[in-house]
Image: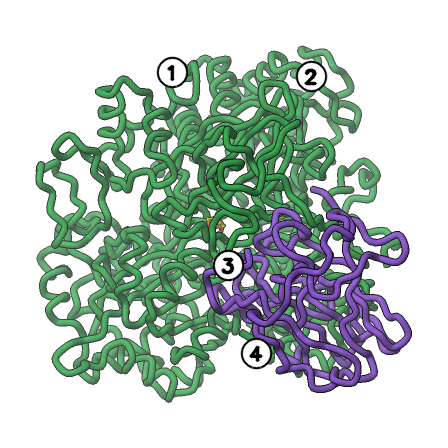
Amino acid sequence: MTDQKDSEFCFSRRLAMKGAACGVMAASFVPSDIVEAATGEADLSRDIYPELRIGNASALIEGEPLAFAYPLKQQPNLLVKLGTTARRGVGVDRDIVAYSTLCPHMGGSLRGRYRHDVNALGPCPFHFSTFDLTKGGIPVHAQATQNLPQIVLRLDGDEIVAVGVIGLIYGQRNNLEGGDFAEDAQKPSGSGRRLMRG
Amino acid sequence: MTDKPRRSLFDKSRREFLTAARTPSLDTGSYDLPVDEVPIPPADAEVLPTACEYCIVGCGYKVYRWPYHSEGGAKPDHNAFNEQFPTGPVSGKWVSPNMHNVVRHNGEPHHVVILPDGETAVNRKGNHSVRGGTLGLKPYNPKRPTAERLQTPMVRSRGMLHAISWEDATTIAAELGRYAIDKWGEEAWGIKYYSYQFWENTYALTKWAYGAVGTPAGAEHDKNTAANDATGVDDAGVDGFSYGYPDVMEADVIVISGSDPYENHTILFTEWMAPGGAKIIQINPRKSPTAAYAERTGGLHLQLTPGTDSVLNNAIARYILEQGWEDSDFITNYTVSSEDMMKETSWRRKRFGGPFEDYKAFILSDDAYRIENAAEITGVPAEKLILAAKMLAKPRGTLRPKASFFLEKGNYWSFNFPNTSSFSGLALLNGASGRPGRILGRLGGHQRGMMKGAGYPLKKSGDLFVHPVTGEKTEDKLPLHFDRHAMEGNLRYCHVIGHTWVTSMSAGQALREKIHSFTRGHEKQVDSLDRDEIIAQLKARMDAGGMALVVQEIYPNDLTEYVDLVLPAATWGETDLTRAQGERRLRIYSKFYDAPGSAKPDWWIVGQIATKMGYEGFAWKDGNAVFEEAAARSKGGHYDYTQVIEFARSNGLSGHEQLRALSTTGIQLPARVVDGKLTGTVRLHDKAITDPENHNWNVTKHKTKSGKAIFMRGDWRMAEPIFEEFKPKDDELWVLNGRINHIWQTMYDDLRKPYIRERWPMNWLFINFEDAKARGIESGDLVHVTNDQVRDQLGRMTKGVLSLVAYLTDEVAPGVTYTYAFYPGQNSNTVVPAVVDPVTAVYNYKIGKGRVEKAGETPLKSVDSAMSFIPRSIG
Ligand code: SF4
Ligand code: FES
């Protein structure tokens, strides 16, 4: 999967998102060729989601989405402070959410298609699916057969931690199979979120 | 809100209703339980061809089936797709969890994956809509909501439904039917049926109803009478499904009237129409997703006042005529002369059709069609009407743009004859009927699943045409108004196949009350389970002016609340079936699992009853026998498949097996054998298509006596009086109804698809921000709609009420609201009067209106509910 053919879907990039750098995250990608090898995969179970610290809540700017990979390196997502209470949102206002940016219809890239005025993601460049980020990624209108997979977040003090995914990410038959875990992904400290089997 | 009981019209029997599955769910949270792993088929999985159950496009699907205790692997040689998992984008091989299910096959549990097939000619690359993409949720599975399937014949005795044998059930239906016909004549025996659930079934039921019984009391699912759909297109001599999808890509401009192809014909739009790059002119009171697409890609949205289509179409035509931009070559070569018209026998064509000159004179004679007047009536700015005319017809150098014209129910379920005729006139004026890029056609609703076993006996109908403008009474026959006939108490036996009937028709509440009074509300009821006593007791009801109601269905629904006898049907995937899609492509829909309980195919049920009624020719041994017999009825028509059967026989195959060999691409009808090969017909009405073996199919001609197209005159003056009488007054709003992307028909499957139900947990009212503000309404509020002007089928003025969740959006203009047409328990036709088109006798479903008031809040307003309220017009 790291040899993805279509360059539009550059899954193997990561967001270098550490400490104070968070506020300017939007464009700070590191090219894939200088990302070092996978983190110690042997430490991570393949049916429990890893945990990934993705930034600080206080550093997020409303309406400015940040990109990050999770749970696998090639799985692109966005993290956004919507400015309005949202389903499964975290933070004081319950308005911080994260979603996959791979369209669950046929895998179109939704990167760069966040609409802050209505808090929707889309339309997908392929067949125009558009998703509601305030309501668990349900379609506004879409041909996708699932909601946009939502990344489950937890707040650890001010730190936002990704702890799992709701829904199957496009292309996968299992969200944790077929690639390396995202950079810096950790084994959950507690009981961890299990993969839900069909 | 949820603990407030729903008011029933019939308090007496409310507690007995089987309503649990049909009330709005009003879930505040997700009850769809998403998973993040799905089984994929192993390399040795069985593969069977089928096609989508739902819309006209008829996308190809393959069913992968394998035993429950095994699973494929991620490596290409470990799975049936020969694909490495994870797959890349647009692989056509990714399995969404909603494409998977567990079914019983030969008594044993099996996994199935129902995958859009990238190898078909229809949905290339495995593209699909949300409707077909969730076919995996359709098959019966006792652990899912599909557990509600009807599984045994049942009779109602002392208010409850009790299981009985097929032997008893078919005998009861046959005896009661026979009794009605013998005592009151065949018009006392009525039938209401789907028109699309596969050729085996529709052939059998029409052979029975119109051939054997010979009743004029019959109507297809979506109509009150056995009439046309897009009448003005049919009368012009144009087959609404003349085209192939590649033809659509050739157009420079596409006019779409009263439909949203992104939502309702998705793959036609996303695979063919949008990639073709044509500019789209969307005629629709709603700024639906396709209208939004049209505007952002250089097209136009003509957001007209509901029902004013004929003014809009004729005004654009008039502007084109005034500029001399009509397609003269086409008019000369493809359309009728006055002499040609002499050969016509149809009264509609003779009264309202003619050559170009008559049409031109008609358009120029009425000032309503001057641009400035039309702008006033339709509410569409004059500049936009002129721009539309220019886009369609203004010559580009020496060439004229290739323009195509598509219509659907937003057009023809409004003022049927004026709308469809004015649209076909505009299309012919621009050279469109059936050539690449120059098509006049329907976008379609369901697939082409009607294969008539016998024709409708029009001469037995007593309904006659009365001219709506002059008041002239004529001897011209209209098909019998089925609902009025039933409400007048003329039906003693009514047989309904795969249709909700009462709740889907205009003035649905009045119809429902009447049918209830003849059946479950009648004083004569069954109190026995003895076959002979059941028959005697129902005959006593029939004698007392009541009705025996028999329903063939797959799920309990609004109609089974009144039914006496329930006959459970086996459906898609449970028996081999056939039909054609929107390009006349004939395919097999393979059986891949065991039907639940003792459910039987509809053709079998009909065959048993008809045989017991004493009719011959109904004792088919299997579905293939029906399919092969039906071929004779197709001969010479646009769905002629006689040579498919001959070809199959020469290969030693059955008709069904031959189609299985043609897989998901099938064959476009009419088909013929050319040089030993089965050859389809890509389009109709195109003189460039040759018929090398001279089979005398008139595929290159139009369906008129002369073979040339007729200009039909769609006259706004026929619509105007009804429009004026029933349009919203004072603080009333239009309450329109129609389809939406996620939902199919009466939701018989969608109610059991948690993913779909979560998006639309109850019926809604799209209402403009301005109208909502004036009424203090917010998204998620409960609203009540009341229309005091619901004239029913018997001419009585009644009241219609409807309760919905408000959805604020600029998708609708101020003054206009929109709901889903067939949401069970919240049928929007209850606020629509039973007004029929005077020329075609079909309902005007789009003439609903009402006062809209806030009635409280729904739990859907909560952030923890999954229903989205973001306007869909955003793109
Ligand atoms: S576009 Fe129509 S035929 Fe194709 S998958 Fe969707 S509903 Fe089925
Ligand atoms: S891939 Fe996004 S809509 Fe089809």
Q: Chain of mark 4?
A: B
Quadrant of the frame with the N terminus of chain B:
bottom right
Residue B454 position by quadrant: top left
**Amino acid carrying mark 4 in the image:** Ala
Quick check: A175 above or below B356?
Answer: above
Q: What element does badge 3 sit on?
A: loop
**Amino acid carrying mark 2 in the image:** Ile
Q: Colour of chain B?
A: green
Q: Is residue B97 visible?
A: yes
Q: Which mark is residue B617?
A: 1
Q: What residue is at 22 percent from the left and 81 percent from the top?
A: B394
Q: Chain of mark 1?
A: B
Between residues B667 and B255, which one lies in front from this camera angle? B667
* Colour convention: by chain
**Amino acid carrying mark 1 in the image:** Gly
Are the two marked residues, 4 and 3, in contact with CB atoms closer than 8 angstroms?
A: no
Q: What residue is at 71 percent from the left and 48 percent from the top?
A: B35
Where in the figure is residue B381, as x and y percent of width and height? Answer: 43, 86
- Judge the density around disc 3: few (<14), some (14-19), many (≥20) Cα neighbours within 10 Å: few
Q: Which chain is purple?
A: A
Where in the figure is residue B115, as x and y percent of width and height? Answer: 51, 43
Q: What element does badge 4 sit on?
A: loop
- Judge the density around disc 4: few (<14), some (14-19), many (≥20) Cα neighbours within 10 Å: many
Q: Which mark is residue A3?
A: 3
| C-alpha separation, residue under disc 3 versus residue under disc 2 | 62 Å
- Judge the density around disc 1: few (<14), some (14-19), many (≥20) Cα neighbours within 10 Å: few
